[in-house]
Amino acid sequence: MRHYGHLSAARRRELFHREPVDFGPDSPVRTVGFALGATLYAPATRPRLADDIRKQVQTGVVSMVLCLEDSISDADVPAAEENLLRQFRRLAADDGPDGVPLLFVRVREPSQILDLTSRLGEDIALLTGFVLPKFTAATGTAFLEAAQAAEVLCGRRLLVMPVLESPELLHLESRQEGLRAVAELVEKHRERIPALRLGVTDFCAAYGLRRTPDATAYDVGLVASVIADVVNVLGRADGSGFTVTGPVWEYFRRQERMFKPQLRYTPFSGRAEQLRARLIEHDIDGLLREIELDRANGLMGKTCIHPSHVPPVHALSVVSHEEFSDAADILDAGPGGGGVLRSSYTNKMNEVKPHRAWAERTMLRAEVFGVARDGVDFVDLLAAGNA
């Protein structure tokens, strides 16, 4: 699969200076982590789940999580598991592994990992891995050992994505030790962890908070501080870090507004004014702002609960021609080089040593999301993704 693979070849040529490359569940773990993009969550109870998955692939979704945890009631778990197995059989019969996105199952407890792996049988070929909820050093070992056992059982790689959402990782008195212990644990399983996910809704719940569509996660001080600390400990660019994904955006229908829209008129003027109006109507302007802040704070990709959130995440993940030009100039100077270069766009300085890690990260993003043509911006990409 590839990002923007749902567009025609001609349309991709119009948009991209370098097109996104193909990737899949067997790609290097770091590539998978960067390529996740907008990971769409769906309850495993959906009666037409296989059809829903096929439909989302046709609109550009490349990763999904089928949830057996918080999105369904405790009483529905047995029925949800049966439905999940039934829908995987349908997918395997109709599409095979090549016709589905990266599929993860969010389990409730470690025992479900081995149980579902056994019950899926040959249909396990469609599964990329598992999402591990409420992950801490205390709970994580059992989850990771279960994933290892499941790999042995099915004879193929199964990836895991821990979710950092427990109160002990939020509370000030336990946060430092909790994150350090998580770092030690996940380091032992680096080869099967493409990304760490942030459960910001659970963090807010610990204090009875809920952000409005006018506020990003970074406007909530408690949340902003824990995101910063997670990236500080687990997202370093020295080779010890992991990809950390952005928090969920909860809104997809028009809400009563207190503040003006956050989306400027100028980029849309004369070409996509109706698109701007639709984004504002569905509170996507706040999401766009949060995606930009995610990237500025070291996060990559995003948890999504509605298909309308996918095109904005992907549009803002594509590397601009200017970013690509700057990154290439920095890397062309060589690892032993130094000094300051004037940007090819003549609007900034590129300092070779301090900006090298950024340039390497940008080039990996360019590989999986592509590089926009000079003159193509996020509005063009957003319009194409929403077409």
Image (spheres, rainbow, N blue to C red):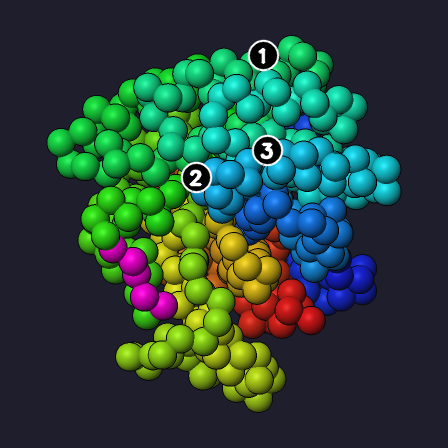
Image quarter for residue 23? Answer: top right
Q: Nearer the viewer, residue 149 or 188?
A: 149
The residue under label 1 is 149
Upstream in sequence: badge 2 or badge 3: 3
Magenta stretch? 209-213
Determine if residue 336 is in view. no
Q: Specify the label residue 197 is tagged with.
A: 2
Along the horizontal axis of the image, is 4 left or right of 239? right
Q: Residue 339: image x %, image y %?
A: 35, 43
Name the front one of labels 2 and 3: 3
Q: At numbered mark 1, what does the secondary structure look like: helix, strand or loop?
A: helix
Q: Residue 375 versus residue 310: which sits nearer the camera?
A: 310
Give coordinates of residue 227: x percent, y percent: 30, 44
Question: Along the line of sight, which residue is nearer the eye, 294 or 125?
Answer: 125
Q: Residue furthest right?
A: 94
User: Hey, which residue is sitting farthest front in the picture?
Assistant: 75
> Is residue 210 a member of the stretch shown in magenta?
yes
Circle 1: is it few (<14), some (14-19), or many (20+) Cα within 10 Å?
some
Up/down of 147 relative to 378, above or below: above
Q: CA distance from mark 1 to mark 2?
A: 23 Å
Note whether residue 63 is visible: yes
Q: Nearer the viewer, mark 1 or mark 2?
A: 1
Q: Which amino acid lies under the numbered mark 2 shown in the image of this protein?
A: Arg
Amino acid on which the number 3 mark rests in the picture: Pro
Residue corresponding to mark 3: 78
Which residue is located at x 18 percent, y 29 percent?
174
